[in-house]
Image (cartoon, grey):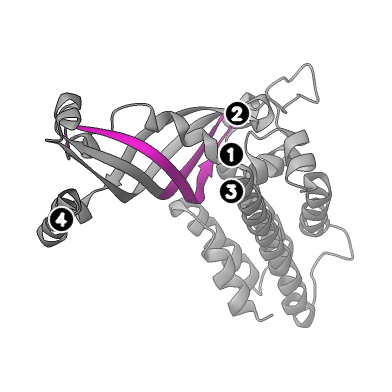
């Protein structure tokens, strides 16, 4: 891979002025041919950049609040290891057992792979005769190796998060949406005197994000309802009517991670049922005319 390609891949993963400035300064170190420590400074700066990015992806408070976090040093209970940050960057607050057993993702093996790439950066930051005043013709190939390691680091995290996302979307139980249909849905309630939900189906669940204790996702599907026009008394006298309709729904949900993800405490801020089709006057008129004809028969 070319240096230009690798630089572009890294820049796409940077956030904020500091990370961009640090990366730019790292490249300036590399280009300072008058400095015998130019490559060492470059490798050190890049390693620090990866440390800052991991800290952004895995904030201290979030990592400590997960169920799986355990301090490795009792005298420093808030100290977070690189491995723990990488674990959070991949799985958030999901339990190790759930990620391993239910989703089939070996985060420990992934962490070892990532650690190996960072070790490549570290070996150049220790100055000795073999790593001091590296010849110019070697700097280019070695800098490519360093940049490739950084790209591999974050590609691995990205790929694992995609794998986890796909697996998690498949494992989120569709029945968690049940309680939404026990309450009155204003947009449907407005359509008729009464309504009942006959059935619903969740067609898609898309994971939006997860942190130390919350999973955020979007769900969409179809709800089948029976609309009743007139009171129950009207229906008994034959003065009312019912009609069945299907509407699409979407909602943004968030649920607390509980009991290894076997259940949620589900909340939602946005839940919408699209009833536009009901208001197509021609369709309604045709339906009513058809119902009247059927009643005459």
Distance from Cα at disc 2 to Cα at disc 4: 49 Å
Labels 2 and 4: the sequence-earlier one: 2
Q: Residues within 10 Å of mark 2 (few under 14, many from 20)?
A: some
Give the prevailing secondary structure in the magenta stretch.
Answer: strand
Distance from Cα at disc 3 to Cα at disc 4: 47 Å
Q: Is residue 5 above or below residue 179?
A: below
Contact between marks 1 and 2 (CB within 8 A): the answer is: yes
Residue hosting label 4: 293
Q: Residues within 10 Å of mark 3 (few under 14, many from 20)?
A: some
Residue hosting label 3: 169
Residue at x-position 39% and y-position 32%: 180
**Local secondary structure at mark 1:** loop
Residue hosting label 2: 263
Residue 80, x across and y down, in percent: 70, 32
Give the mark toward the camera: 3 or 4: 4
Identify the residue at the far right of this view. 129
Contact between marks 1 and 3 (CB within 8 A): the answer is: no
Residue at x-position 48% and y-position 29%: 266
Magenta span of residues: 192-221
Q: Is residue 64 left or right of residue 137?
A: left
Labels 1 and 2: the sequence-earlier one: 1
Distance from Cα at disc 1 to Cα at disc 4: 43 Å
Labels 2 and 3: the sequence-earlier one: 3
Give the mark toward the camera: 1 or 3: 1
Give the quadrant of residue 81. Answer: top right
């Amino acid at each position: 891979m070319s240096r230009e390609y690798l630089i572009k891949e890294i820049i796409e993963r940077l956030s904020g002025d500091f990370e961009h400035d640090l990366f730019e300064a790292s490249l300036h170190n590399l280009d300072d041919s008058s400095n015998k420590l130019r490559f060492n400074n470059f490798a050190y700066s890049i390693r620090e950049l990866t440390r800052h990015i991991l800290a952004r992806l895995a904030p201290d408070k979030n990592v400590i609040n997960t169920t799986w976090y355990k301090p490795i040093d009792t005298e420093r209970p808030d100290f977070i290891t690189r491995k723990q940050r990488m674990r959070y960057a991949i799985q958030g607050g999901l339990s190790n057992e759930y990620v391993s057993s239910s989703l089939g993702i070996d985060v420990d093996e992934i962490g070892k792979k990532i650690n190996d790439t960072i070790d490549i950066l570290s070996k150049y930051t220790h100055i000795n005769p073999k790593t001091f005043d590296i010849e110019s013709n070697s700097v280019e190939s070695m800098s490519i190796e360093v940049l490739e390691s950084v790209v591999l680091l974050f590609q691995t995290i990205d790929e694992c998060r995609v794998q986890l996302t796909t697996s998690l979307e498949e494992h989120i139980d569709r029945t968690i949406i049940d309680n939404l249909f026990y309450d009155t849905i204003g947009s449907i309630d407005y359509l008729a005197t009464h309504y009942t939900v006959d059935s619903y189906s969740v067609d898609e669940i898309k994971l939006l994000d997860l942190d130390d204790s919350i999973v955020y996702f979007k769900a969409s599907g179809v709800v089948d309802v029976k609309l009743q026009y007139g009171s129950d008394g009207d229906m008994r006298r034959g003065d009312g009517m019912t009609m069945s309709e299907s509407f699409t729904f979407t909602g943004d949900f968030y649920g607390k991670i509980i009991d290894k993800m076997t259940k949620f405490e589900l909340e939602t801020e946005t839940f919408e049922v699209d009833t536009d089709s009901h208001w197509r006057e021609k369709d309604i008129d045709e339906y009513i005319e058809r119902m009247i004809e059927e009643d005459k028969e």
